Amino acid sequence: MQSQPNVGPDADGFLCIGIADKAADAQRILDLDGIDPVKFDHVDIVGVEREAKQLGVAIDRYMRLLEEAISKSPLSDPLKTNLLTSLDLISYKGLQVIRVRVPRQTQLTFLGDECFLRIGSSTKKATGPQIAAASKLFSQK
């Protein structure tokens, strides 16, 4: 199967914080924090409460810290604003997961002066020719 970039005007996505996509990571969290992961499809839900606890803050303050980090990031608009308005805290079997909706974009997004593309299961810094090719996806009708 050929990898397809995860970009373009028709691609909504979600970023979930509090999920371990590797069994070794879930085991490490169990060993360190005593969080018994909840299996869901091919991932383990571990929640974000343990991170809030390590920071010594309540979960709502943890969410505000995430919002502040996004706000101060070099992420370009309109994506930065879209992310800030689409943070959800979801409870699943007693564990809290942060879901960030990444709405479809009408242009490439940059982190400062750099652009990254999702190719298959990896995210790579884009080269000039890759940026040019990816930007054409947004001009197609």
Image (tube, helix red, strand yellow):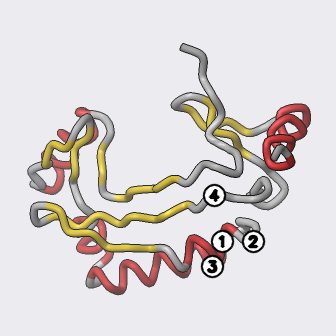
Q: Quadrant of residue 83?
A: bottom right
Secondary structure state at the residue bearing disc 1: helix
Q: Are marks 3 and 1 in contact (CB under 8 Å)?
A: yes
Residue beneath label 3, please? 71
Residue in front for this viewpoint, 8 or 82: 8
Secondary structure state at the residue bearing disc 4: loop
Q: Residue at x 65, y 34 (%)?
A: 5
Q: Residues within 10 Å of mark 2 (few under 14, many from 20)?
A: few
Q: Quadrant of residue 3?
A: top right
Gap between marks 1 and 4, in whole Å? 13 Å
Q: Are marks 3 and 4 in contact (CB under 8 Å)?
A: no
Of labels 2 and 4, the one closer to you: 4
Q: Which mark is residue 80?
A: 1
Gap between marks 3 and 1, in whole Å? 7 Å
Count of numbered badges drawn on the protein = 4
Rendered location of residue 120, percent (x, y): 56, 28
Q: Amino acid at mark 2?
A: Asp
Q: Is residue 35 left or right of residue 105?
A: left
